[in-house]
Image (cartoon, rainbow, N blue to C red):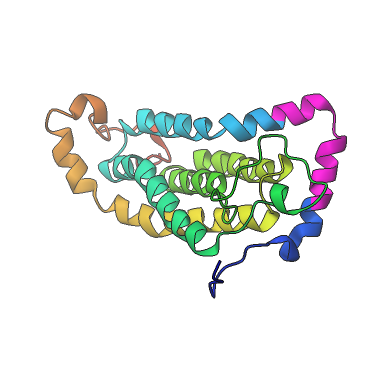
């Protein structure tokens, strides 16, 4: 197989010792803890979809710039995932559970072709969380905390190196930081959508006398 200039087939030289240490903790941890982290790692991304739904529900009473950011958040996640897929195809890093002797993964170790760097789970979680941070700081902060837990869980279950999840988090963050403010400029488009058939879904927008419940969602604070 020809070697590519950017190929990093074995990432163990970067932080393999840290991965091995975490993997050892996972092997010696109580069974219930491993099972809890395993379930979170496998299903936890659904929580970010619920966060987005909550943001949409609240943004129905917010100004159109806020609703535009909410509607853009799943698009930003998809674009971040696409960017990450390019990196995966360039680097082609072997999974640590397949590379490091003695390592044990709590879920089935992905086979050749399902590359390790960067972590898709981390990219999705952080792209969603940072997008929501631009909608509402409180919701975004909570989402970022869960995104960090998602990233850590991928190392704990044994399918990623720490640098996989760190770079994945960075990719998701950067894509969201670039695109979320751009989405906020699409408020006039949401205004037009709110005046048509989509009004029941998008809501009436910011009420004339904004109540405190809309604070952080584009309504003025009193």
Q: Does the magenta stretch include residue 157?
A: no
Which residues are drawn in magenta? 20-36
Residue 211 in view here: no
In the displayed image of the protein, which residue is found farthest to the left?
196
- Residue 193 drawn at (x, y percent): 16, 37
Viewer-closest of 79 and 70: 79
Q: Which quarter of the rendering shows the C terminus?
A: top left
Residue 211: image quadrant is top left
Residue under the point 73% across and 39% down: 105
Furthest-right residue in this view = 28
Q: Position of 40 compared to 31: left or right? A: left
Residue 37, position in %: x, y?
70, 32
Q: Is residue 161 visible?
A: yes
Disc tally is: 0
Query: Which picture quadrant has residue 207?
Result: top left
Dominant secondary structure, magenta: helix
The quadrant the N terminus occupies is bottom right
Report the residue at 75% width, 61% height from top.
15
Q: Is residue 160 left or right of residue 138?
A: right
Residue displayed at 61% across by 66% down = 8
Describe residue 103's horizontal placement relative to residue 83 as left or right.
Answer: right
């Amino acid at each position: 197989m020809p070697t590519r200039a950017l190929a990093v087939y074995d990432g163990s030289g970067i932080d393999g010792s840290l991965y091995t240490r975490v993997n050892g903790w996972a092997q010696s941890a109580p069974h219930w803890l491993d099972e809890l982290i395993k379930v979170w790692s496998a299903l936890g991304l659904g929580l970010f979809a619920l966060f987005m739904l909550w943001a949409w529900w609240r943004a129905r009473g917010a100004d159109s710039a806020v609703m535009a950011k909410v509607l853009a958040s799943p698009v930003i996640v998809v674009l971040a995932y696409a960017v990450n897929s390019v990196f995966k195809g360039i680097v082609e890093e072997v999974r640590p559970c397949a590379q490091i002797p003695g390592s044990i993964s709590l879920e089935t170790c992905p086979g050749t072709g399902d590359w390790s760097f960067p972590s898709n789970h981390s990219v999705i979680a952080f792209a969603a969380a940072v997008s929501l941070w631009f909608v509402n700081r409180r919701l975004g902060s909570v989402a970022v905390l869960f995104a960090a837990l998602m990233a850590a869980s991928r190392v704990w279950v044994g399918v990623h190196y720490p640098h996989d999840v760190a770079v994945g988090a960075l990719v998701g963050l950067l894509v969201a930081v670039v695109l979320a403010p751009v989405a906020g400029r699409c408020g006039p488009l949401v205004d037009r959508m709110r005046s048509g058939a989509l009004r029941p879904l998008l809501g009436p927008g910011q009420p004339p006398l904004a109540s405190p419940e809309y604070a952080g969602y584009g309504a003025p604070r009193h």
